[in-house]
Amino acid sequence: VIFNDSLLYLSPPPRSKGRWARLWKISYGGVLKTLAGSLLIAYEISCVKGGLILMTGELPPRFMYAKQWQHLTMFILLTLNGCVDGVSKNFLPQRCVLLEKGSLVLTFYVLLLLLVSHVQDSAGVELQIHALLVLVVFLLLLLLTVELWAPDTFQLLVIKSFLFQMMGSWLIQAGFILYKPVSGYPWQDDDINDIMFVTTFFCWHVMINVLGLLGIYGISSFWHRCYRPSWKLTGSREASCYPSTVGPLCKLLQEVEQSEKDDQALLLSKSSP
């Protein structure tokens, strides 16, 4: 936004031709999703004593570890979404942003269904925490669905960044409330004050994340205006005219470059005897 360029989903050109050139093309987001999802899958399986089994051996058989299987399904979705990002950015001839966005939307549809089912036997503090998380995921789902038809819209991008921050920070907060309370004492489900303070903490997260977004934008804008990085225009030219992009910005830059070349040729012709 600060650079006033629409270069959000471009495949960056290789910065070198050596052995490390392929590192610049790696989908780091996809790698992190796949790695995090795989580690969480291994952790979830290892947390169940005796192994994560699906059904009992008794007659009639009964399903077991319903919540753990839901956690496992969420982590598998995260891993698959990371694999889709990696395939789109590193293995397809041309990056398919629609495939990445569609995969992310599908992941959130399934995630919302799992979360709604996840709170069936919850109560008190745990129910309030999950209800607020469902709210954030539902808003993200609506936004990501709209973004399929209105990509690169500034307002949607800002709200999406904010909601992803809210989801991440609230998940961390939920872990400390449910499993590792800072005070060392568990929260009480029958205490209305504890339940009310869950919502208060959520509101604090809203304010902190908004301030975080404003701080990031303010610092970036200040740095850009004060230091004027020399690579702003050159970076835009190289990235915007990369083979995966065709658009008004690339055509405009090509016309500017051609005009500069014509001016230089005219000056040379006048100065030559």
Image: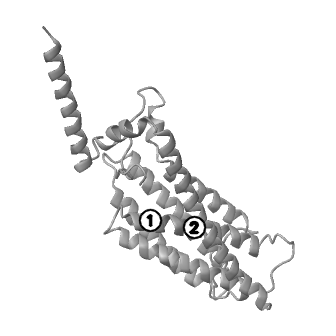
Seen in the image, is 254 located left or right of residue 226?
left
Question: As shown in the figure, which amino acid type bears the numbered disc 2?
Answer: Val
Name the secondary structure under disc 1. Answer: helix
Q: Residue furthest right?
A: 184
In the rendered image, which quarter contains the C terminus? top left
Q: Residue furthest top?
A: 273
Residue at 70 percent of width and 89 percent of height: 123
Q: Is residue 81 shown above or below 32?
A: below
Seen in the image, is 79 located left or right of residue 124?
left
What residue sits right under mark 2 in the picture? 210
User: Which corner quadrant of the image does residue 154 belong to?
Assistant: bottom left
Question: As shown in the figure, which amino acid type bears the numbered disc 1?
Answer: Leu
Which one is nearer the viewer's eye here, 149 or 82?
149
Q: Would you call the spot at circle 2 few (<14 residues within 10 Å), some (14-19), or many (20 or more)?
A: some
Q: Residue 258 shows which numbered tag?
A: none
Seen in the image, is 189 located left or right of residue 118?
right
Q: Residue 104 shows which numbered tag?
A: 1
Residue 162: percent from left, percent from top: 53, 67
Q: How is the image coloured?
A: one colour
Q: Is residue 98 shown above or below 105?
A: above
| Label 1–label 2 contact, CB within 8 A | no
Residue at 72 percent of width and 86 percent of height: 196
Name the secondary structure under disc 2. Answer: helix
